[in-house]
Amino acid sequence: MKGRLNVRKLIATSAVVASLNGINSHAGFLDILRGEPVEPQRVAFIGAARVQEVSGTVERLSGIDRWTAVENGEVLKPGDMIRTTTGTAIVRMTESGSFVKVTPNTVLRLVPAQEEDRSLAQGIEEREGLVVRSCRGKAYFATESGEWEPVEVNQVIARGAQLRTEAGAMLDLFDTQSKRPVRVPGAVRLKLDDQALASRVAGQPSIASAQR
């Protein structure tokens, strides 16, 4: 009887922890019990890059199923793939000169400017507009009907759309036209036109963040 009570107490405690951490009460709880890893985020960037900084475990796909450690200064070409588990990496894109920070539990693939198989790039860079790479805090964009919708990671916002962010927010976008990252801080309201995007690129550090 005492053993059954302890099991029930453990399950109840685990459920509370999952709820407090914002985990799905069903899938997340089963992952905890089974010990299954969280599915990594998969992102794609166009062109070649050079690894500027590595921290923790970062690996590069060599061949079909062999992963080798990534080192500082390593050159990545279109078609290369790296993954982070508990580590992070900062890479510099060759063509744009912009920096991309790859956060833990992410798979990054570099794709050619003209990728025949769009599914390999997951259709992110090929879609026209501004791809949301990360969003910390609250940010909203206006739809064609004039309604404000919350910004979500991997969403594509059309050029010319109205955008607003609340105090303390930070929004990282990727412009598929200029192939440049754009960072928008909190407590601003702007129209995502050429002039506004150019000022955001020129006036702030050119850093994009690939993260969950």
Image: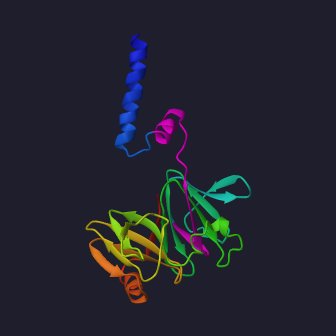
Q: Position of residue 151 (x, y in %)?
A: 40, 66
Q: Nearer the viewer, residue 98 or 5?
A: 5
Q: Is residue 115 left or right of residue 166?
A: right
| Residue at left offset 42%, top offset 14% | 3
Q: How many marks?
A: 0
Whether residue 77 is situated above or below residue 19 in the rendered picture:
below
Q: Is residue 146 magenta?
A: no
Q: How is the image coloured?
A: rainbow
| Residue at left offset 43%, top offset 65% | 134
Dividing the picture into quarters, in which one does residue 43 lie? bottom right
Whether residue 84 is situated above or below residue 7 in the rendered picture:
below
Q: Position of residue 12 (x, y in %)?
A: 38, 28
Q: Nearer the viewer, residue 76 or 178?
A: 178
Q: Nearer the viewer, residue 131 or 172?
A: 131
Name the outermost residue toward the front.
145
Name the outermost residue toward the right.
64
Name the outermost residue toward the bottom.
195
Q: Which residues are magenta?
A: 26-52
The answer, for residue 190, to whether it is visible in the render is yes
Q: Position of residue 26 (x, y in %)?
A: 47, 39
Screen quadrant of the N terminus: top left
The answer, for residue 55, to whether it is visible in the render is no
Q: Position of residue 46 (x, y in %)?
A: 60, 74
Q: Nearer the viewer, residue 119 or 76?
A: 119
Dividing the picture into quarters, in which one does residue 14 lie? top left
Q: Is residue 179 left or right of residue 205?
A: right
| Residue at left offset 37%, top offset 40% | 19
| Residue at left offset 35%, top offset 83% | 203
